[in-house]
Image (cartoon, rainbow, N blue to C red):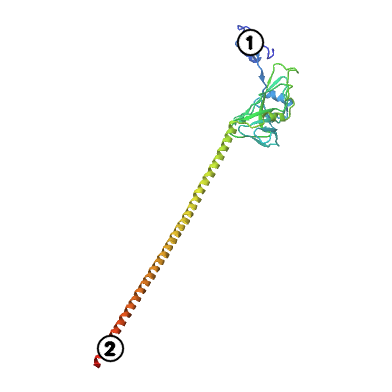
């Protein structure tokens, strides 16, 4: 059987029975090129292979031809106060806010044989809530260690995850022949056991996602609303207390005006009283002069009358003597 990377050119006129192609996992394209198809291991095959490839291993986690890997005890999310990873206790929960990137790591240590290629994803129930796997979707043959996932919450709500939760399905396909030692993976992630500071530094910092911008806009709207309410309250207080102050000023002004009117009236009364008193004194003085004149005249008249009487008596006495 030819390897996957080779192909055999055949004549178009040559025919291949369909059952033979399927049985031998062969594919013929329109140009007559024949390929051998990689197949995925089924659940029965995984039961025989994975006990030596996954630790800790649980056969109950094999579902529909995939093994469900679980959330480990380390994670990191962006838009946090400190650019450090977080360590979870058993069954402890954490939250990935909308618009945040996160680094997650599996609880299990896995090994991919040289004859296999792994494919990884996030469970559909979590993806439907908006969590997207933005890291690689395959695991190289020869890899050994914990798998790291870079994910992004593209949903409108926070996503809560838990240590030990089944999150990451792993499928295994089989090469047509095993890779050699110099062909298997031997990169920087070999034997990785946790989230490193270098991993954190690559994604840490503020992420101006639509969700974050919407949150900031809502915060600004809230502050503007609070300021508007404060201004309205101040205006209401100014109107309320301003009315009271104006009423007090009016009352004081009216009282002041009334006092001024009363003072004016009092001054007028005093002036009138003085004028009347002066007129009375003047009248009294005039009457006194008139009375004195009359008295003088009366005295003069009485004196004249007395003198006339005396003259008459004198004349009568002289006549009697004669």
- Identified at 48% across, 56% down, the residue is 252
Q: Is residue 255 above or below residue 228?
A: below
Q: Quadrant of residue 258?
A: bottom left
Q: Residue 294 or 35: which is nearer the viewer?
A: 294
Q: Is residue 287 above or below residue 146?
A: below
Q: CA distance from mark 2 to mark 1?
A: 198 Å
Residue marked by disc 2: 314
Circle 2 packing at 10 Å, graded few (<14), some (14-19), many (20+), is: few
In the rendering, at what x and y percent does residue 129 appear? 60, 31
Comes first in the chain, label 2 or label 1: 1
- Pair 2/1: label in front: 2
Looking at the figure, which quarter contains the N terminus?
Answer: top right
Can residue 300 be seen here?
yes
Can residue 60 be seen here?
no
Q: Residue furthest bottom?
A: 321
- Identified at 57% across, 35% down, the residue is 217
Q: Quadrant of residue 6?
A: top right
Q: Is residue 6 above or below residue 238?
A: above
Q: Quadrant of residue 128?
A: top right
In the rendering, at what x and y percent does residue 193 appear? 73, 29
Circle 1 packing at 10 Å, graded few (<14), some (14-19), many (20+), is: some
- Identified at 57% across, 34% down, the residue is 214
Left or right placement of residue 220 versus residue 165 in this view: left
Residue marked by disc 1: 33
Q: Which mark is residue 234?
A: none
Give the total of numbered labels: 2
Looking at the figure, which quarter contains the C terminus?
Answer: bottom left
């Amino acid at each position: 059987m030819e390897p996957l990377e080779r192909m055999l050119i055949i004549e178009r006129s040559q025919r291949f029975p369909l059952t033979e192609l399927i049985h031998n996992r062969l594919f013929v394209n329109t140009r007559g090129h024949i390929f051998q198809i990689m197949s995925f291991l089924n659940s029965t095959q995984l039961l025989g292979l994975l006990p030596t490839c996954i630790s800790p291993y649980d056969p109950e986690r094999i579902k529909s031809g995939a093994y469900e890997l679980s959330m480990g005890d380390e994670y990191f999310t962006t838009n946090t106060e400190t650019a450090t990873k977080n360590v979870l206790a058993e069954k402890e929960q954490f939250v990935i806010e909308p618009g945040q990137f996160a680094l997650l790591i599996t609880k299990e240590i896995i090994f991919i044989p040289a004859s296999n290629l792994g494919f990884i994803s996030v469970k559909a129930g979590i993806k439907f809530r908006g969590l997207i796997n933005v890291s690689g979707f395959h695991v190289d043959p020869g890899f050994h260690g914990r798998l790291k996932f870079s994910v992004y919450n593209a949903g409108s709500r926070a996503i809560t995850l838990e240590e030990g939760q089944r999150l990451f399905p792993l499928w295994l396909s089989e090469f047509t022949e095993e890779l050699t030692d110099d062909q298997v993976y031997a990169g920087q992630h070999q034997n990785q056991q946790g989230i490193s500071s270098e991993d954190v530094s690559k994604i840490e910092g503020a992420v101006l996602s639509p969700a974050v911008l919407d949150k900031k806009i809502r915060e600004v709207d809230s502050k503007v609303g609070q300021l508007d309410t404060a201004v309205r309250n101040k205006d209401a207080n100014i109107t309320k207390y301003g009315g009271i102050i104006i009423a007090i000023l009016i009352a004081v002004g009216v009282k002041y005006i009334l006092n001024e009117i009363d003072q004016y009236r009092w001054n007028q009364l005093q002036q009138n009283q003085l004028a009347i008193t002066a007129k009375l004194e003047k009248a009294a003085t005039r009457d006194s002069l008139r009375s004195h004149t009359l008295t003088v005249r009366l005295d003069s008249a009485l004196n004249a009358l007395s003198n006339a009487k005396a003259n008459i008596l004198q004349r009568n006495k002289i006549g009697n003597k004669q």
